[in-house]
Image: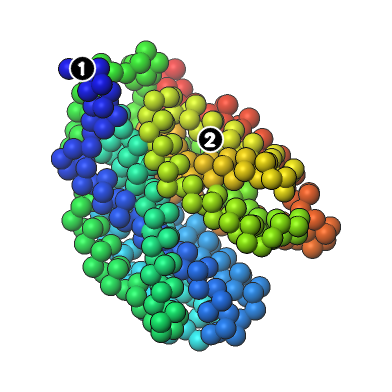
Amino acid sequence: MSEPQTGLEGAFGEFRGRAFWVALGCLICQMGLGLTYIRTGLAADLIEGLSLTRAELSSSASPQLALQAIASPIVGYLTVRMGASRVLGVASAFFAFVFFGFSRIDSLSGLYLTTAAIGLGAAGMGDITVGHIISQWFHRNRGLALGIAYAGSNLGGSVMVGLVGAVAAQASWREGMLAVIPVALFILLPTSLWLVRDPPQGHQAALEELHRDAMNAEETERRRNEGSDLDLKAALRTRSFWILTFTLFTFFFYFTGILDHLVLFLVDSGLPKEEAVSAFRQAVGLGVVSKILGGFFSDRIPRLRAVQIVYFVLGVSSIVLLALPHPVLLVVFVFSFGVSQACRDVVYPLVLGRCFGDRNMGEIYGAMMLTLFPGGALGPLFAAFLRDELGNYDLAFGTFAGLNVLACVGLLLVRDERVSRIA
């Protein structure tokens, strides 16, 4: 076989047969996460239709984050024991029920209830379930497979917000919510049940044997010395679990703080509103390409190194943030933040598999995702409080940068815990 053919085989060799359809199914299921963006896309309609203040609408994100975080360990447990297909199927049907209810609400309490339910559906349809099943089917091309699957959330956000917004513009926001139901029942549900499948017994061992000759010396040595995959109870006793959990908290704290306040900060700094919104959209829009390319390159470097690089770039973005809105540095921020926040989705399942093994990855990741609520809720509130008290974001953004640097240092201490148990 020629060299170019060998390279192509290495990059895409596992995307064949049932594995290809599983990856496609995971991509489509991840598009269901785009449903979580609908509330933001219809913000003006909801404020007018429900007579809400902006603060009341913003506060409705907290129930969603809280229930998504609380449900994540349960979702991880069920994914390992029942299979990802069933969990994704239940989440798809549940989304249809939730958005039917969303079309009928007429109060702030109803909004809180439905956003909380959306958080529950997102936990079942999200990174834990998809990350677990991809990790079972792919070995050598796992990073690329995760990048392709996780890009679905970015695609889904764009498609679903556009669809619901178009229906709302022609009719009302209530009819827009009803447009979600056929998508959930006739696209997401069949995909979950027919395309997503657990691999047959011994599939991973067969993949490892197939690619054993392509492993580098470090990988070969690690596999020779590694112990059995860790379950959640064993993972809780390792330092890597707590370091990775802390870095997940710092990520959500920074990421959600930027999502809520970047446009406001840039406008406060004198940037026209249109340019500020454009910078924000560019940062988020980089996610599709970043996840795929990030997954591709993650297959070619050690997995611990991949997560360290991603957090380093994330830290760079938070340091550059302190010098905005300088035009050149704004471009640097948009690129570094957009790429790193998207690649984080891809490299985390990879590094969890590297540290604890793949068998119980969904359960371990689910436990770590408890940090979504405190990190995701406190980041925006922290920035808002300091902005109101001090009149600027300097201290808030300085704290973001400090935490990101601390996370980078912590990741240097993460290790393969299976090796350490038998060393």
**What residue is at 61 percent from the left and 69 percent from the top?**
58
Task: From the viewer's side, name the closer residue of 73 and 237.
Answer: 73
Vertical placement of 342 versus 378: above or below? above
Task: From the viewer's side, name the closer residue of 212 and 388.
Answer: 388
Which quadrant holds the C terminus? top left
Quarter holding residue 231: top left
Which quadrant holds the N terminus? top left
Name the residue carrying label 2. 310
**What residue is at 46 percent from the left and 68 percent from the top?**
38
What SS does tag 1 mark? loop
Residue 182 in view, yes or no: yes
Residue 229 in picture, x, y percent from top left: 35, 32
**What residue is at 23 percent from the left and 30 percent from the top?**
13
Residue 180 in picture, x, y percent from top left: 35, 72
> What's under tag 2, amino acid-wise?
Val
Vertical placement of 320 versus 396: above or below? above
The numbered dot on residue 2 is: 1
Task: From the viewer's side, name the closer residue of 349 and 320.
Answer: 320
> What's under tag 1, amino acid-wise?
Ser
Alpha carbons under labels 1 and 2: distance apart: 33 Å
Q: In the visual, does 327 lie left or right of 187?
A: right
